[in-house]
Amino acid sequence: MELKTIEAVVNAAISQYTNEKKPEPVPANDGVKIGVSQRHIHLSREDLDTLFGAGYELTKKKTLMGREFASEEVVTLVGPSLKAIENVRVLGPVRKQTQVEISRTDTFVLKVSPPVRPSGEVAGSERIVIVGPKGSVYLKEGVIIANRHIHLTPEYATGHNLEDGDYVDVLVEGVKPTKFYEVQIRVRDDFNTEMHIDTDDANSAGLKNGDTVRILGKSGR
């Protein structure tokens, strides 16, 4: 083949390659990042004083979202059968009510039966004993299994026609594809766009921190 012919073929191939339509990039906010929530506890001011000493202030270990942070402090949870789970992380800042969030697997260790609830809805929930370095608290109610929920920025929510309190269905793709139904939407100025699930849900769907899922639309509630 003559040199000119080879050059023409190469130029034609390059032209075809460069003129091919490239795939459109996926919008940055099209997927929702996963955050796997380990068992943890939120403390009231009164219970923090009882467990760690009067006037005690939590020591920030890691910022989580907005004003929420994981602290250096941990407590022990003790169920009615005296079975315990140690080193349960305290999250700050302090709240009006103490709330313990555990997984269904944890309930088998502690021998408790908490309801699945949105955060903050603790009336009539399960009881437990909390032990700290300076004292203990008998919590008459406040133990829940947190419902699946998605934190959204106002911009993401507006752009996807979603509002605080909506419920959506979510598609999980990957090695263990599945759907999560009736996932609660929470919208706040200081939120990141992130879906929170507990360790049981993460393991069942093969998900880890940083994986992404897709909102399919509002649930048919």
Image: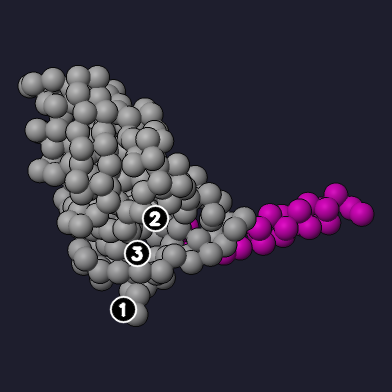
In the rendered image, which residue does mark 3 sit on?
183
Q: Quadrant of residue 101?
A: top left
In the rendered image, which residue does mark 2 sit on?
32
Asked if the residue at tag 2 contacts the one at tag 3, i.e. Cβ–Cβ closer than 8 Å, the answer is no
Looking at the image, tell me whether mark 1 or mark 3 is earlier in sequence order. 3
Q: Quadrant of residue 218?
A: bottom left
Judging from the image, what secondary structure is the residue with disc 1 in?
Answer: loop
Q: Is residue 182 visible?
A: yes
Q: Is residue 15 magenta?
A: yes
* Residue neighbourhood size for the residue with mark 3, other residues' Cα within 10 Å, grouped as few (<14), some (14–19), many (≥20): many
Name the mark on residue 221.
Answer: 1
Name the mark on residue 127.
Answer: none
Instruction: Say which of 53 and 171 sits in front.
Output: 53
Instruction: Say which of 43 and 220 sits in front.
Output: 43
Judging from the image, what secondary structure is the residue with disc 3 in?
Answer: strand
Calculate the distance from the C-alpha at mark 2 to the C-alpha at mark 1. Answer: 22 Å
